[in-house]
Image: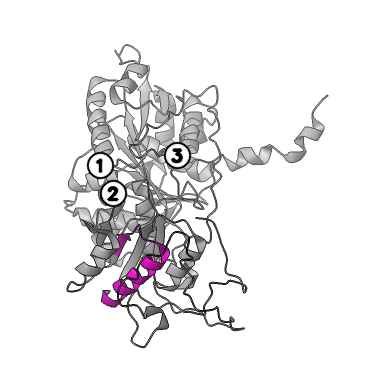
Amino acid sequence: MTTFRTTDSDPFDLGFEADDEFAAPSGADPWRTAPAPAPAPSAAGDPFADFPPARPRPEARPDPAPGLASLASNPFAELVAPVLDAPRAAPAAALAAPEPAPPAMDWGVSAHDDVLPGVDAGVGEASVPRIAIHAFGVHAETLAVIEAAAADRRMARASVITRHGGLEAAVDFYQNQPTPSLVLVETMDSAQRMLAMLDGLAQVCDPGTKVVVIGQTNDIALYRELMRRGVSEYLTQPKSPLQVIRAVTALYSDPSAPFVGRQVAFVGAKGGVGASTLAHNFAWSMAERMEAATVIVDLDLPFGTAGLDFNQDPLQGVLDALSQPERLDPVLMDRMMVRCGDRLSLLAAPATLEQDYDIGADAYEEVTQKMRGAAPFVVLDLPHSWASWTRRVLIGSDELVIVATPDLASLRNAKNIVDLVRQARPNDVPPRLVLNQVGVPGRPEIPVKDFGEALGVAPSLVLPFDPKLFGQAANNGQMVAEVAPKSKAAEGIDHLARLISRREAPSAAKSASILSGLFKKK
């Protein structure tokens, strides 16, 4: 919808202040004089012809009360198309495969292009809280989009019920039924009839209920009037589940949270493929090369190696967070993490066998969700084991990186993971594949091309077998880029960081000075 701002000469500004919730006010309201739906006007008529003349705006107007109908909560005020920096091509020395184009989605929206306008592409997306949602649709296509959105990972905690009939059916249904936290109603009526029907819905809505209207008219005046009447959001025929998801998510986002960190999960197709090593080096590259604040979380409680790789031995770590997830706040979180650099923090695993780690999946989910507020990028190092919490974390991450070696066991396991993720995350980008330890002398290997074709995912990165470099870095408690910054492995990991962050390294951008062209030799 077109961006607009309120002006003093707004002919539709009637001086009306919306209620805190979408519900009927206790006093008399001249806007609610029609208890029944008004007859539809002719096509040539003005839908706002019966509106009383606009009253002058007072000089100083108090801030609207905090609530769902606040005029300050205009979700379209900051809509600006994002400008994404194209990832720089990998260095010639790095064995990085070209980034594959994502497969076309059933909704005709590219998984990479469908990014919320005005939001940094490198930022993660919040999930919908545990709420009840009722949707009343007119068209079967609209209900299909809403049902697809309900099956998305971001709305896994919400309970969604869809019904046919649109706005009129919603008014009839709630005559004797309580309203849920959120009601989505579709209407194909004219503006005047829509407003009259919404007045009827307001009479039966419970306080605190949010209402999202789906219509066919992309009109600024109508949008303004809906916001004044307490409607939380207005959508014009969503074509993608992500449009519905992001509209609902925006209604329940925490305005005090500065960002939602992007969660990147690393998992190995089998043990010993180097997933943990790559996760740690990737996090270091994000912090040092991309200059982005990053947190590395080691979730391999008994055998985690993040503390060794970063040469740290913290007293507290991820086990303390998982043991008391309800108490985890930014202050406690900061105490549990250890600083590994100016922009890199570590939440280490205990790496001991003194106790059994019987922790529920809900605790893992709560901790990983709260960790998103610690930094713009959160890297999860997952163990090579399968449990209910592992499935949840994999499906709930913004990016998933599968690390494999070119052998049959890795191929089978990687395919199982890819198939699971594709089914559970139909609206997300496919997982990224990293082939590690390629070219072991004397070992028969599956060709890289055949490996990718069998999975249906082209490798984002192919790293050669280099035991001397990785062994030296591990024994010294250093990263590969610190030991050999010009090596193929270091350049390949930096390339992967650029792909996932969708940004260029600031150091490279600074070196290309604007005045550099003045000093070139003629």
Q: Position of residue 292 (x, y in %)?
A: 51, 48
Tell me the residue at 44%/66% (across/down): 255
Q: Quadrant of the C terminus?
A: top right
Vertically, is 132 above or below 104?
A: below
- Residue at the bottom extreme? 27
| Residue of label 3 | 500
Query: For the stretch drawn in magenta, what is the main secondary structure?
Result: helix
Magenta extent: 183-204
Vertically, is 170 above or below 272?
A: below
Q: Position of residue 315 (x, y in %)?
A: 34, 57
Vertically, is 510 above or below 357?
A: above
Measured Cα–Cα span from mark 3 to mark 2: 20 Å
Question: Mark 3, mark 2: which one is toward the viewer?
Answer: 2
Of residues 345 and 115, the one drawn nearer to the viewer in this rendering: 115
- Colour scheme used in the picture? one colour
Q: Tag 3's secondary structure?
A: helix
| Residue of label 1 | 424
Of residues 96 and 458, the one drawn nearer to the viewer in this rendering: 458
| Residue of label 2 | 153
Q: In the rendered structure, which amino acid carries the disc numbered 1?
A: Ala
- Residue at the right extreme? 522
Q: Which mark is residue 375?
A: none
Q: Tag 2's secondary structure?
A: helix
Magenta segment: does it hold 193? yes
Q: Tag 1's secondary structure?
A: helix
Q: Earlier in the sequence, mark 1 or mark 2?
A: 2
Measured Cα–Cα span from mark 1 to mark 3: 20 Å
Measured Cα–Cα span from mark 1 to mark 2: 7 Å
